Amino acid sequence: MSEEKYEPVIGLEVHCELKTATKLWCACPNEFGGEPNTHICPICLGLPGTLPVLNRNAVEYAMWIGAALNCEIKPSKFHRKNYFYPDMPKDFQISQYDEPINVQGYLDLPTGIRIRIERAHIEEDTGKSSHLGKSGRIHASYGALVDYNRAGVPLVEIVSAPDIRSSEQAKDYVSELRAVLVATGATDGRMEEGSLRVDANVSVRKGPNAPFGTRCEIKNVNSLRSLVRAIEYEIKRQIEILEDGGRIVQQTRHFNEDTLSTVALRSKEEAQDYRYFPEPDLPPVSPLDTWINKVKQELPPLPSQRRAKVKETFGTAEDSQIITLVEQDLDGLFLDVVSRGADCEIALRRLLNEAASQIEAAKKLDAQDFAELIGMEKSGKLSATQCKAVLANMLEGGGSPMQIAASLGFEGMNSNELEEVITQIINDNPDAFERFKAGDEKVSQFFVGQVMKATKGKANGKAVIEFLEAKKS
Ligand code: ADP
Ligand code: MG
Ligand code: ZN
């Protein structure tokens, strides 16, 4: 089969829950989880006679997202999108249709590729239904439960142009988008809790100049790994159909985590199926220029800017390291520690290898303490292993690295003590030292061994070799 001659075309729709205190139209708490149907009221249940009142903070968050994605922020309107589904208590979803708040932006990926954003609009989330039975899906279930806690939670849906050309690029896009969204403070971006959800539109075509093929939309992929797998599977499935002389039917499909395949859910609705019409209970939203400008000015530094700053400080760090550092939100600590004189390379290594596995604790590290610790490793007062042990303790409870090192018995030796010991051993073994001077590397291990014996293991091997080297001349 000739996968080579086909080019995948992918556009992503990302739903992101906003971190407002209350829901989009009512004062119910906007909190993940909770006993089913405890964060509800007549408004978010869509009971007759109730009126929605737009949450100002949700609009502001949506504007932050628009500004961060280089969109034009515009006067906008709400529409009703009509469809029947039990998790939509009103039988329609209030969304934005042809006049969304943010249009025509873009996101630059760390690889340098630019993905255009068609729109980023405000809408309400639905409730959650669970199907009873083995599969957990509606098919073959014997009953359904519905929880409306999520109904009416504010969402922004970010729709990319069909500019993505591979599953890897789709992953890069979602990672970067997630980082940007989290940096704005508009969302926590937790895919596993469903506060960030991705639908992938996938088609294939014969080469970069051919017209776009018919797309299928894969719903609710809930991790980056699943996203890559779902897209890969879908590309293959479509190519096989085309190679067999078939044609692709536009469909909504579901990715099955167990079989790693996509299955058809329903034939794709057209806009006309939703009978969109303007929401009569809500006025248009036209943010004033002063408000838009304030949002743009207050926008915190975005991941790309933060990465550039780290690169400026430590030019030889690898891009992947810098991406992770910023992703883990540890770049602030890194820059702080380095500005206190800590060695860039060691600080980065300890942050990425040790601290990153305990992010929350790492963010609370005192920069001065951390800088001191890095200094102790750099000077050889602590070996790398000892440094890691001290850091583990710092992450657990904090405290000064000096005290922790002492309590762990890593007092190390100061340079003067060490030099005395080494000088003594050199004097006792003149022949060996001659061989070392002549370039016999193996003898250095002999000296390290002797020093360790004399100091009961307190000395740092690296420091011993440095002293020996220094004594050569
Ligand atoms: P819908 O509401 O039908 O899902 P949207 O306009 O909201 O339509 O979203 C369409 C998404 O599909 C966009 O992300 C767009 O980039 C993508 N898309 C459009 N045409 C294609 C295509 N031929 N192949 C892949 N993706 C496509
Ligand atoms: Mg869609
Ligand atoms: Zn409510």
Image (tube, rainbow, N blue to C red):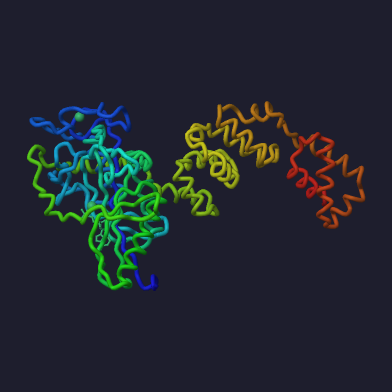
Residue 29, by quadrant, is top left
Q: Position of residue 40 (x, y in %)?
A: 22, 28
- Residue at horizontal 32%, vertical 72%? 243
Left or right placement of residue 269 versus residue 343 in this view: left
Q: Is residue 106 visible?
A: no
Q: Position of residue 227 (x, y in %)?
A: 37, 53
Compared to residue 333, the image places residue 41 above or below, namely: above
Q: How many marks?
A: 0
Q: Position of residue 170 (x, y in %)?
A: 36, 56
Q: Position of residue 207 (x, y in %)?
A: 33, 72
Left or right placement of residue 148 versus residue 448 in this view: left
- Residue at horizontal 67%, vertical 30%? 405
Left or right placement of residue 153 versus residue 99 in this view: right
Name the quadrant of the N terminus: bottom left
| Closer-to-camera residue (258/277) | 258
- Residue at horizontal 23%, vertical 33%? 148
Residue 28, by quadrant, is top left
Q: Is residue 343 visible?
A: yes
> Splitting the image into four quadrants, where does ligand 3 fall?
top left
Compared to residue 403, the image places residue 202 above or below, namely: below
| Closer-to-camera residue (192/161) | 192
